[in-house]
Each structure stands twice: as C-alpha cells, then as structure tokens.
C-alpha cells in the first residue's frame, strides 16, 4: 500500500485533466440530469435557501397562516371583545423555518501499480460514476430527514396500512384507494399532492398490474403528455404516473427500515407537492484532484455543502451539521404551522414482490 497522500506542488497531472474537462461542472449537470427527484419536481432547487454568505444553518422568517377570531356585532354600545362597541385589531404571528447545512465529502486514491494490474484506469471509472453516487447519498440523507420529521413533527400526516406480522394481502398493498386515504389526511388540500415517491418493489408492483403508465415528454419540455400504454415500448427515460401523480422510484426510500423484527418487510411511500421539499446550497459541488509523484498515486476529492428543507418545518436541535442518524431523530424536528398545511404525507405499505421478513 502506498504512503498516505501528501500535497506536493509538482506533478498535478490529474488536476490538469479535471480542469480541462471542467469535471465539477460536468458532474453537477449530470446530477441534475439523472436525478428523478429533480426531474419530477419532488425536490426543487431554491436559490432563496442558499447560504453562500456564511452561517451554519438556513433561517427562513415567515408569517403564520391567518386565523382570526370572529366578533359578534350588534346595535348595543358594548358589543365585541372590547365591550366598547368596536372591533379589536388582532396581530399576525411569525415564526422561523430552519434548515441545518450538511457538510459532506469523500475521496479516492488510485495507485499506479493497481492501474497497471487492472489494465484500465480505475480513476476514469470513478469519475464516470460520481453523479450517480452523489445522487444516491443525497437521497439517502433526504429519507433520513423525512423519517425524523414523520416520527414527531409530522406524525399526523402519516398512514400505515402495512401488515403487522406476515401474510400481507391486497389490503396492505398500494392502490388508488390507499392513495385517496392518504390524500384525505390533508383534507381539501390533499388534492394538491402531485408526486409519489416509492421503493422499486412497490413501483414495479404497479407496473406488473398494469397500473403504472408513463409520460415521456411533459416533464422535460412542458409539452403535451405522451402516453406509453402502461410503459410498453417507451424508449426515452420516463417517469411513471399513478392515481394522478408522478411516480419516482428510489431504493433509498427505506434508508431507515420500517416495521419490526419477524414481520414481513414494509415500504415507505411519500406523497408530496412540487416545491414542498427544497434544496439550498452553501457551496457548489467541488471536485479537486492531484498527483503524488512520490507515492505514485492519483487522488480525487469531492465535497458538497447543502441542506434539504421541507417547507413549514424547522431543525430544533442546538447542534449543526447533523449526521444521517441525527437527521432521522424524531425529537430534533418541529413544525412552524399546522401540519395539514404542509403538503407531504407518509404512507407505509407491503408489496407482493418482496415478502421477506425482517
């Protein structure tokens, strides 16, 4: 094993390659292109949440929803809460939404000897997979955060129809009926939910039963919807639709596994409205490279400094830069206004495509 990397000023061959190819910009664009979260509208990039001027958290002041107290007006001289015959002015209250910035990064090193033995350039393979790897890490972090929110602050916005034990049947699977029940948690605002995030075992069950259809043009170009007959014969990268919602499949949805030991595996689903989950950036994705001419290593480092934020919620813990485990802790989150005004619902189901037990 070669010696640990040291920052010598000479021999920055890989750095030259990165600069010529503008790798940071390329990977950033690839992340957006390959992220179904961003393409579906489930997560929206928001410059309003950027914290490039500094700080450890993002604070968003807000006016709380108006909830006036009515007064009964009469012809008497003492009507109203004032008991003096006039309306008493009321105040609108305020709160602050808070998102904690997560500082994350990783690095790879490749020895010349390993490259010679492999007959190929491992660093080239690493660079080609960076966008997908970062998307996976980002979605995992987001689902930890959603787990934390629904364990406490948003607990009233969740529906669990999973089987307690084994032997799940159609009553425990995702259907249009269960989506309607989940929408109903928000009352009349349930109709605003337009995106459904599911595990592949749930999404492909919909595909298997012919319930998942596909649109190949409207999401990207804003044009007319092109239907693909249940997904058959669709060649372009597409996003499925079910029960009037765009469907995004991601295996990280169960980053924190629901259910109990010995029970049939369950899957989280999330129903949301576009623009509810936002992403803020403190520093754009940075990729740096160098070459250690003494240890004969190419080294690549990646770091990114971002925050996910669900509108209407706040990070209430005193600590900053939370780990995934901290993001998933129920007591570290709060809501800044009535949760039925937050268009986000958690639904727990089973799938006949995976009947394993925990």
Image (cartoon, rainbow, N blue to C red):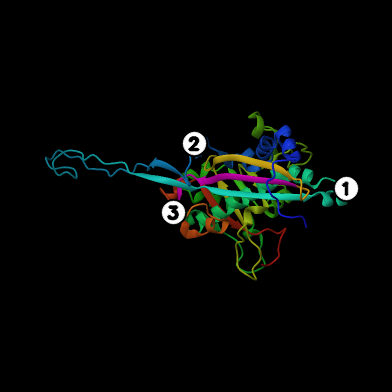
Quarter of the figure with residue 85: top left
Is 180 displayed left or right of 230 in the figure? Answer: left
What type of secondary structure mainly makes up the magenta span? Answer: strand
Camera-side residue: 282 or 18?
18
How far apart marks 1 and 3 lie (CA) works out to 52 Å
Q: Is residue 187 on the magenta stretch?
A: no
Which residue is denoted by mark 1 in the rendering? 119
Q: Earlier in the sequence, mark 2 or mark 1?
A: 2
Which residue is denoted by mark 2 in the rendering? 48
Mark 2 surroundings within 10 Å by alpha-carbon count, few (fewer than 14), some (14 through 19), many (20 or more)? few
Which residue is denoted by mark 3 in the rendering? 316
**Quadrant of image for the N terminus:** bottom right
Query: Residue 183: x, y in percent?
Result: 53, 48
Is 92 displayed left or right of 254 in the figure? Answer: left
Query: Residue 226: x, y in percent?
Result: 70, 33
- Check whether the beta carbons of the residues at disc 1 and disc 3 lie within 8 A of each other: no
């Amino acid at each position: 094993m070669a010696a640990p990397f040291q920052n010598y000023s000479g021999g920055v061959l890989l750095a030259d390659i990165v600069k010529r190819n503008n790798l940071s910009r390329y990977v950033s664009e690839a992340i957006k292109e390959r992220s179904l979260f961003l393409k579906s509208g489930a997560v929206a990039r928001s410059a309003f949440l950027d914290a490039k001027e500094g700080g450890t958290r993002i604070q968003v002041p807000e006016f709380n929803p108006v909830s006036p107290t009515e007064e009964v007006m009469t012809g008497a001289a003492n009507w109203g809460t004032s008991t003096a015959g006039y309306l008493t002015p009321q105040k609108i209250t305020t709160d602050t939404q808070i998102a904690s910035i997560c500082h994350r990064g990783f690095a790879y090193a490749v020895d010349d000897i390993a490259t010679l033995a492999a007959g190929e350039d491992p660093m080239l393979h690493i660079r080609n997979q960076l966008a997908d790897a970062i998307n996976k890490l980002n979605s995992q972090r987001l689902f930890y955060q959603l787990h934390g929110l629904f364990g406490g602050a948003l607990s009233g916005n969740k529906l669990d129809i999973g089987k307690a034990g084994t032997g799940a049947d159609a009553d425990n699977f995702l259907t249009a009926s269960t989506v309607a029940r989940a929408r109903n948690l928000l009352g009349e605002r349930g109709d605003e939910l337009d995106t459904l995030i599911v595990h592949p075992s749930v999404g492909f069950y919909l595909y298997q039963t012919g319930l998942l259809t596909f649109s190949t043009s409207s999401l990207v170009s804003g044009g007319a919807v092109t239907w693909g007959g249940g997904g058959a014969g669709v060649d372009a990268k597409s996003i499925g639709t079910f029960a009037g919602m765009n469907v995004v499949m991601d295996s990280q949805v169960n980053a924190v596994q629901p259910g109990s030991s010995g029970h049939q595996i369950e899957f989280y689903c999330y129903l949301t409205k576009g623009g509810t989950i936002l992403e803020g950036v403190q520093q754009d994705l940075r990729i740096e490279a160098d070459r250690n001419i003494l240890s004969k290593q190419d080294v690549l480092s990646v770091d990114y400094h971002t925050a996910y934020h669900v509108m209407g919620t706040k990070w209430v813990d005193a600590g900053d830069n939370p780990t995934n485990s901290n993001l998933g802790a129920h007591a570290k989150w709060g809501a800044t206004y009535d949760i039925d005004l937050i268009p986000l619902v958690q639904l727990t189901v089973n799938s006949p495509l995976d009947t394993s037990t925990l």
